[in-house]
Amino acid sequence: MRRAATGMLVLMAAIFLWSGRYLDVHPAWGYIHAFAEAAMVGGLADWFAVTALFRRPLGLPIPHTAIIPENKDRIADTMAVFLRENFLIPQVVARRMREMNLAGAIGTYLADPGEEAGGRIRAGAGEMLVEVLESLDPERLGTQVRAGLASAIERLEVAPLLGQILDAMIADGRHRPIIDSIIRWAGLVLEDNEDMVRAMIHARANALLRFTGLDERLANSVLDGLYKLLAEVLVDPDHPLRAKIEEGLVDLARGLRDDPEMRARIERTKADILANPAVAEWWQGVWERVRRKLIAMLRGEGGEDAGKLLASLTEMGEALRDDPRLQLQVNRFARRTAVGIATRYGDNIVRLVSETVRRWDAQTITDRIEGAVGRDLQFIRMNGTLVGGLVGLTIHFLASVL
């Protein structure tokens, strides 16, 4: 395009020189001469303007030329500010995300990804993930994942969270099945340890009770009383002992939330568990099994498990596609996540753009911008040549008439 625009300028210069020899032959040659002369002026002016954007025309130190190289840093800051103010503002991100049904689109793809394209995408993504899982050092990767989880758990204060969960369970009545399970477990423990209970009673009975055999009857009475108590607590939802257990759970939830000493004990216990080498070894084994299972499933070697995974993904896709309430929740979560990223990391993204452009040398940024818009700029030169010629033709006509 640069050669075409320059060729048009050279053509106008040739017409100007050629037509100048025939001005006395016929008045029409004057119009051709005026058109070519003005076209040269317009073409040269636009060549100067276009060239001055990217470099100094003919290498001359003319003021206000080589605009882009000379203002590279200001352009970088302007691009960054434009990106921040038009794309990374939380309100803009929220509005854009509100117009998208991300959950519906994901659900449609998962439910029916398409025979050919979907298969290629899944195969390519699966192979890439397999290569990543195999190329990375399993022990090092597992250690990094464990360290990340441990760091996240260390920052998380567990006691208040447990207290809130326990409060919510009590408020909804979901603690009652747990109490029932505890009572049944207590009954089984008592049944498995009857001999130990009898031995304890015999050991504490005096000689008269043992001589008369009343210690055995006492042991039977104690065991029967305990079994009866557990049965009554299990079948009676209003039993006083059950109320005491619930009261204890309420006190436990309150302590987990509000008692600094209890919260400190929970945090110390959490730290001891995380620091235990046995936990690290257990996690390493879990991670290695998960990694191998993932590789086998992605390679199609998972057999029934792979089929279950695909079926689960399809069911999840159908739920996302067909359930408006689920879509609303997922879209809301995605919107809040995007807004949170824009709020927390928007300045970092802007700084990254600005610093990247600032690090480019002047020739690099000039070549990239000229490569992006240079074609249209050469059209400006062509249009300037034609418009200049038409203006010159009009002026020559008016001068002839007047």
Image (tube, rainbow, N blue to C red):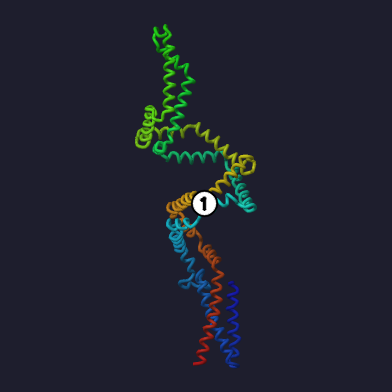
Residue 360 drawn above or below residue 53? above
Q: Is residue 241 above or below residue 334?
A: above
* Residue at figure coordinates x 45%, y 56% from the top left: 93
Image-quadrant location for residue 28: bottom right
Residue 48 rendering spot, x and y as whole percentages: 51, 75
Residue position marked by numbered label 1 in the rendering: 103
Q: Nearer the viewer, residue 278 or 208?
A: 208
Is 401 located above or below residue 108 in the figure? below
Circle 1 crowding by C-alpha within 10 Å: few under 14, some 14–19, many from 20? many
Rendered location of residue 310, percent (x, y) = 60, 45
Residue at the spot 60% in from the left edge and 73% down from the top edge: 3
On screen, residue 144 versus residue 25, left or right, reads left
Q: Residue at x 39, y 38 (%)?
A: 171
Residue 243 found in image quarter: top left
Q: Is residue 263 visible?
A: no
Q: Mark 1 belongs to which amino acid?
A: Ala
Q: Percent from the top left, x then y, of residue 51?
A: 52, 72
What is the quadrant of residue 26 in the picture? bottom right
